[in-house]
């Protein structure tokens, strides 16, 4: 249980850091877009990230709700309990996918090779879109589970 609390606190700290660094003004990049042709693609990747990152709070809230539902229902049918535990696991997986993407995201500078930098950003766009889809679907399913009595 202590491990889960520590992991939760670390997740909150990471989300807080991302929300602070994620507040960037895209107008600053207009001038550099001409110098750096990959800047627009980088901005698009970050826009998807910035759209999904606030949903991490929803993941944690839903996880707590489902855990409380299990804890507060001692006579819960075993199949229902297993279903809720699976949903909690799915919420954890979605959260981990986002954290992994953030830790692994390391775009190449265009000065090295603009083509490789562009290819990297395109692959990262695909990855962050998959993370977004996973988080959205998992939250939607968990909300349905949490709403059921």
Image (cartoon, rainbow, N blue to C red):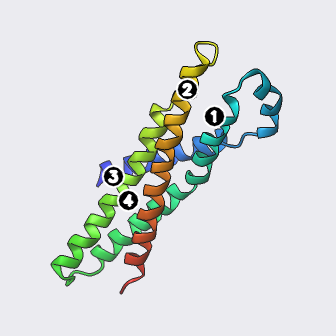
9 or 82: nearer the viewer: 82
Give the side of residue 17 with respect to residue 103, left or right: right
- Which of disc 2 and disc 1 is earlier in sequence? 1
Marks 3 and 1 sit apart, C-alpha to C-alpha, by 33 Å
Instruction: Tell me the residue that label 3 is attached to.
Output: 4
Quarter of the figure with the C terminus: bottom left
Confirm or deny contact between disc 1 and disc 4 (CB under 8 A): no
Q: Which mark is residue 107?
A: 2
Instruction: Tell me the residue that label 1 is attached to.
Output: 42
Please report the residue visible at 31 percent of the width from the left and 51 percent of the height from the top. Answer: 2
- Which of disc 2 and disc 3 is earlier in sequence? 3
- Which of disc 3 and disc 4 is earlier in sequence? 3
- Which of disc 4 and disc 2 is earlier in sequence? 4
Q: Secondary structure at mark 2?
A: loop
Residue 55's place in the image compared with 127, above or below, is below
Instruction: Tell me the residue that label 4 is attached to.
Output: 91
Give the side of residue 109 with respect to residue 63, left or right: right
For the view shown, which residue lies furthest in the front direction? 115
């Amino acid at each position: 249980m202590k491990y889960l609390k520590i992991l939760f606190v670390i997740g909150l700290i990471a989300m807080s850091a991302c929300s602070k660094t994620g507040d960037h003004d895209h107008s600053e990049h207009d001038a550099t877009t001409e110098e750096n042709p990959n800047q627009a693609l980088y901005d698009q990747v970050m826009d998807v990230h910035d759209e999904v990152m606030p949903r991490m709070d929803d993941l944690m809230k839903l996880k707590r709700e489902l855990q409380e539902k299990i804890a507060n229902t001692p006579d819960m049918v075993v199949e229902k309990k297993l279903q809720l535990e699976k949903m909690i696991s799915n919420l954890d997986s979605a959260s981990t996918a986002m954290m992994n993407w953030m830790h692994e995201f390391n775009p190449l500078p265009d000065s090295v090779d603009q083509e490789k930098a562009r290819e990297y950003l395109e692959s990262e766009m695909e990855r962050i879109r998959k993370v977004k889809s996973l988080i959205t679907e998992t939250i939607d399913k968990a909300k349905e589970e949490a709403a059921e009595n």
